[in-house]
Amino acid sequence: MKPFDTTRFRQSRFFYSVAFGCCAILFTACGNDSGSATTNADSSSVMNNTASLKPKGEDPAWGKDIDDEMLVVIEKLQSYGDKPIETVSAPEARMGHTPTDAVMDVMKEHNIPVPPSNVDTIGKDIPVEGGSIHARIYTPKTTDSLHPVIVYYHGGGWVIADLDTYDASAKGLAEQTGAVVVSVHYRQGPEHKFPTAHNDAFAAYQWALKNAASFNGNPKMVAVAGESAGGNLACSVSMMARDKGVQMPVHQLLVYPIANSDMNSESYQKYAQAKPLNKPMMEWFAKNYLGDMSKAADPLISLVTANLKGLPPTTIVGAEIDPLQTEGKLLSDKLKEAGVEVDYKLYNGVTHEFFGMATVVPDAKDAQGYASGRLKNAFNK
């Protein structure tokens, strides 16, 4: 039986929630496989558009140095009144509001326009062991006949979120690197326990290598990228490719990746109650995907304990107000110890999930530009 397509399910809920008051372009540009979504913009326009974004309340205890624009998004997210994710079932959590919803509503309320799209998108089902998974392919609107390829994995703790939730990140990378981005929606827990998402991620990478020519991609120039749980998957794919003798990615972009099983690290303690990601949520994700908590020590989960030798050049983006901050930096250090070329950049004043918020959070635009520059350098070598 074909697995339930959460991407298409969320599209209907997402379109309904933003339809009123948004410009007509949203119906062809917000997370549709046959259109393109939108939360990146020119740097100067981002600064102009967000100048009026001021939070309604004081800085929270868990984020005294949080940027105004970031807090505006967090306040909007909290205003929906959803139950804490760690208190509901996985299906209920998938029905809740997301940071993407908050960004779109902030844009609507402050008359921030949706930037024009410079990519075309198409959906594709990818066969995997025991079924199929869905991917969205973003192709830049250029005359180039052959593009580099980025296989991108979204976040959500291997349990929630989908292609729509992380559409802006995938689109931003495609537009700014000139690469075709294959955004992968892997199967999630608790319905599909570890290592299903990891195996799906590797299968999607292999599919991209074999089928790149069919979507104007260069099979010799393929990178991997991901956010949060997706950053973990991207690095795991590189390790699996190395161990199985499969062509290695030319680069890996890891945005605030899950990289350790230690939930008592410095950042976990400091940002235990942060938003939109906190310690109770991470415990909930682990329970739903891993089931048996002893599996958290597996090198595919706890990357900092893995054999990291021979992995591709790496870019790691960190967020200050994030329980995962410590392990992202630790992974950078461990990769360097293993002889891997690494560039690490920490963004202060922002939280987990900031990377795709370029229309309202200036640091997100900067981070996308930084990451895209690193990827372009890798493609040009």
Image (tube, rainbow, N blue to C red):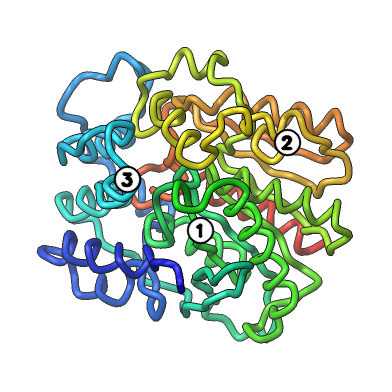
Q: Position of residue 84 (x, y in %)?
A: 26, 32
SS state under label 1: loop
Q: Residues within 10 Å of mark 2 (few under 14, many from 20)?
A: some
Disc on the earlier residue, 3 or 1? 3
- 142 lies left or right of 283: right
SS state under label 3: helix
Residue 89 in which image quadrant:
top left
- 78 lies left or right of 223: left
Q: Position of residue 347 (x, y in %)?
A: 52, 32
Task: Identify residue for label 2.
Answer: 299
Question: CA gap, disc 2 to disc 3?
Answer: 29 Å
Question: CA gap, disc 2 to disc 1?
Answer: 20 Å
Task: Identify residue for label 3.
Answer: 99
Residue lying at 61% horizontally and 55% vertically, measured from the top left: 372
Instruction: Name the kind of residue labelled 3 in the image.
Output: Pro
Query: Is there CB contact under 8 Å for labels 3 and 1?
Result: no
Residue lying at 70% horizontally and 47% vertically, measured from the top left: 236
Query: Is there CB contact under 8 Å for labels 2 and 3?
Result: no
Instruction: Name the kind of residue labelled 2 in the image.
Output: Pro
- 264 lies left or right of 349: right
Q: Quadrant of the C terminus?
A: bottom right
The numbered disc on residue 100 is none
Residue lying at 52% horizontally and 78% vertically, measured from the top left: 124
Disc on the earlier residue, 2 or 1? 1
SS state under label 2: loop
Relative vertical location of residue 344 with respect to residue 267 in this rendering, above or below: below
- 45 lies left or right of 190: left
